[in-house]
Amino acid sequence: MSIDLRTVTLQPLRQTYGHIARRFGDKPASRYQEGTYDLQADANFHYRPTWGPQYEIFDASRSAIKLADWYVLKDPRQYYYGAYTIARARSQEVAEAGFRLCRRQ
């Protein structure tokens, strides 16, 4: 009795989700891109809101700001939670150093 062990490599059919592939192409996306781009529902709402029945729930014409792509407003630095908290801690330290300088004088 012999056992033949082989390694089989499976090729994925696609590299990322469809909404990310339409925006960036079929390449592996970062977690930031998967979690922030094109997740807002914009179709197939069953009811109009009772407070404004002339609009859909997330109607772009409700805003005075008109953009062709609402995702151009994303932060280019792509702050993750860790990087954000480190930057905020650093700015807090700078502010406290400024306060100490003012107290000494």
Image (cartoon, rainbow, N blue to C red):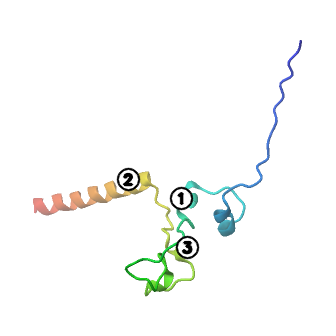
**Residue 85 % position (x, y):** 37, 54
Q: Which of the image's four quarters has the N terminus?
A: top right
Label 3 crowd bin: few (<14), some (14–19), many (20+), radius 10 Å: few
| Kind of element beneath mark 1 | helix
Q: Is residue 9 above or below residue 42?
A: above
In the figure, is residue 90 to the left or right of 46? left
Q: Which mark is residue 86?
A: 2
In whole angstroms, how far apart are the C-alphas of marks 3 and 2? 35 Å
Q: Secondary structure at mark 3?
A: loop
Between label 3 and label 1, give the one nearer the viewer. 3
Q: Position of residue 95 (x, y in %)?
A: 24, 61
Look at the numbered discs 3 and 1 and tell me whether their residues touch, using CB distance below 8 Å: no
Residue at image coords 56%, 78%: 69
Q: Which residue corresponds to mark 1?
A: 35
**Residue, x 32% and y 54% (percent of image)?**
89
Q: Pick the residue in front: 68 or 50.
A: 50
The disc, 3 or 1, on the residue closer to the chain's N-terminal end is: 1
| Amino acid, disc 1 | Gly
Crowd band around label 1 with a 10 angstrom C-alpha radius: few (<14), some (14–19), many (20+) = few
- Residue underneath mark 3: 42
Judge from the rendering whether residue 26 lies leftward or rightward of residue 76; answer left or right: right
Task: Give me the residue at 76% from left, 49% from top.
Answer: 12
Could you tell me residue 49's position as x and y percent?
Answer: 43, 77
Q: Secondary structure at mark 2?
A: helix
Specify which label sits upstream in the sequence, 1 or 2: 1
Q: Amino acid at mark 2?
A: Ile
Q: Is residue 28 above or below residue 50?
A: above
Label 3, label 1: how far apart the Cα atoms are: 17 Å
